[in-house]
Image (tube, helix red, strand yellow):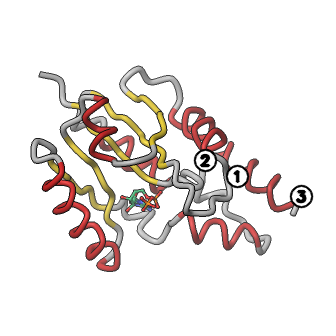
Amino acid sequence: MSRVAIYPGSFDPITRGHLNIVERALHVFDRLIVGVLDNSKKTALFSVDERLGQIRKAVGDDPRIEVDHFDGLLVDFAERKGATVLLRGLRAVSDFDYEFQMAHMNKKLFPEMETMFMMTGEDFFYVSSRLVKEIAALGGDVSALVPENVFTALTGKYKRS
Ligand code: ADP
């Protein structure tokens, strides 16, 4: 049986921290679906289409990876995709509370699905999309924290605004 995991998030934008999780997940799972949450309540810097394009470019041409978006319940998306593992990254204790709650809630909604956590890569524990945007907006150099195409996109966004 092939093991399919779903890695959901906002990815606004995708960072090298996210990519580190994607790479390592491929050592554990046969297929990985990167799911971009299309959340109209959260104001995002990049549109869903921009984020999908950025992720596809950053992960390259790997047949084991699928990049798609979803709105509504994550468990419905996972079920539709045939995924039985929900993968999340953990950086610090501050991530834990929310993740703990979500994992239990998702278990209630879709008992066949397991949430699994992967510890952040040691070089990336301090990297978040939010911080990357804040630094880039102030003109700081985030080129080491995001893939090249995202760096270009960030520079473009903040030059215009
Ligand atoms: P969300 O809004 O769902 O938290 P994010 O795009 O911020 O979406 O994060 C998606 C997932 O990636 C989450 O599980 C988050 O903890 C994880 N993640 C984000 N940045 C890192 C990082 N630097 N190292 C490891 N995991 C990370």
Ligand 1 visible in quadrant: bottom left
Task: State the image coordinates of residue 55 (x, y, percent, origin top left).
Answer: 55, 39
Does 143 sit above or below residue 3? below
In front of the other: label 1 or label 3?
A: 3
Does 54 sit above or below residue 30? below
Quadrant containing the C terminus is: bottom right
Mark 3 nearby-residue class (10 Å; few <14, some 14–19, many ≥20) = few
Q: Amino acid at mark 3?
A: Arg
Residue lying at 68% horizontally and 58% vertically, measured from the top left? 45
Extreme-right residue of the structure = 160
| Residue at which label 3 appears | 160
Task: State the image coordinates of residue 107 (x, y, percent, origin top left).
Answer: 14, 54
- The answer to whether residue 89 is left or right of residue 41 is left
Mark 2 nearby-residue class (10 Å; few <14, some 14–19, many ≥20) = many
Question: For the residue labelled by badge 3, is the local secondary structure a helix, a strand or a loop?
Answer: helix
Q: Are the two marked residues, 1 and 2, in contact with CB atoms closer than 8 angstroms? A: yes
Numbered circle sitting on residue 151: 1
